[in-house]
Amino acid sequence: MITALDKAECADREVKQRRRVYPRFVSDGRMTQAFADRQIAVMEAIAADYRIVADAEAAAGRLL
């Protein structure tokens, strides 16, 4: 089973990877800065969404 926490952590790792790799893509002309910024922002939003769900699942588990 893949949990919301698993997804949030994976998305967090992807954000870090993009922050590390995209500057080189921009400097190589393979990506515009605007596109890189947008793609990082999208992945940050995905991570935040999954973090909300993971936190709610954890809170519900503590209530049981």
Image (tube, rainbow, N blue to C red):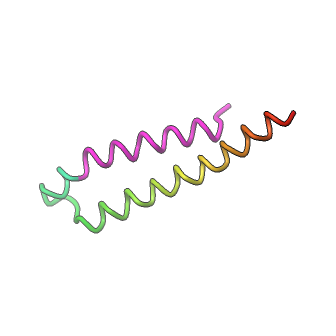
Is 18 displayed left or right of 61 in the figure? left
Residue 33, percent from left and from top: 23, 64
Taking the spot 67% from the left edge, 48% from the top edge, the residue there is: 53
- Magenta-drawn stretch contains 30: no
- Quadrant where the C terminus sits is top right
Is 43 displayed left or right of 49 in the figure? left
Q: Residue pushed farthest bottom?
A: 34
- Magenta-drawn stretch contains 18: yes
Q: Quadrant of residue 14?
A: top left
- Quadrant where the N terminus sits is top right
Taking the spot 45% from the left edge, 54% from the top edge, the residue there is: 43
Residue 30, percent from left and from top: 19, 58
Q: In this view, does 37 lie above or below 22?
A: below
Taking the spot 79% from the left edge, 34% from the top edge, the residue there is: 61
Number of numbered labels in the structure image: 0
Residue 46, percent from left and from top: 52, 54
Q: Residue pushed farthest left?
A: 28
Chief secondary structure of the magenta portion? helix
The span shown in magenta is: 1-22
Residue 18, percent from left and from top: 32, 48
Is 42 displayed left or right of 2 in the figure? left
Taking the spot 22% from the left edge, 61% from the top edge, the residue there is: 31
